[in-house]
Amino acid sequence: QEQLVESGGGLVQPGKSLRLSCAASGSTLDYHAMAWFRQAPGKEREGVSCISRSDGSTWYADSVKGRFTTSRDNAENTVYLQMNSLRPEDTAVYFCAGDPDYYCEPGQPLAARDFHSWGQGTQVTVSS
């Protein structure tokens, strides 16, 4: 059974950067779309970013546009989320998700129900 494993979370001061990684035990080529979601305490899981395999199309939540960048290295079976200019409101558990059929379309918000495979999550805490 394929697994997605996140890493790279931690405690960081506001304004600093972190890079999250998501390693697939199989091949990321199996997932057309790779996405990042996050969930803060007491809040629903929300989509953060998405990247498609076919043409590299991406989607970002308005709250992270210009600060976060997602990328995928299919040779390394890894997806990344580069997070810059972090804010306290970015504090959450970040989850990696993959789906073989989904297409990341600009303007189309992510829904957790559209993704087939999930990682266990990594905690990101932004605090001074």
Image (cartoon, helix red, strand yellow):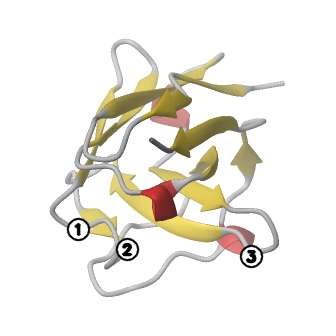
* Residue topped by disc 2: 61
Q: How many marks?
A: 3
Secondary structure type for disc 2: loop
Q: Position of residue 53 (x, y in %)?
A: 33, 46
| Res. 38 image quadrant | bottom right
Q: Amino acid at mark 1?
A: Lys
Asked whether the residues under the numbered discs 2 and 3 touch, taking CB atoms below 8 Å apart as contact, a structural biologist would say no
* Amino acid type, mark 2: Ala
Label 1 SS: loop
Q: Quadrant of the C terminus?
A: top left
Local crowd at mark 1 within 10 Å, few (<14), some, or many (≥20)? few
Q: Position of residue 127 (x, y in %)?
A: 49, 44
Front residue of 39/78: it is 39
Q: Could you tell which of marks 1 and 3 lies nearer the N-terminus? A: 3
Q: CA distance from mark 1 to mark 3?
A: 20 Å
Asked if the residues shown at circle 1 and circle 2 are in contact, with their CB atoms under 8 angstroms apart, the answer is yes
Instruction: Kindly identify the amino acid type of the residue bearing the numbered disc 3.
Output: Glu
Q: Residues within 10 Å of mark 3 (few under 14, many from 20)?
A: few
The residue carrying mark 1 is 65
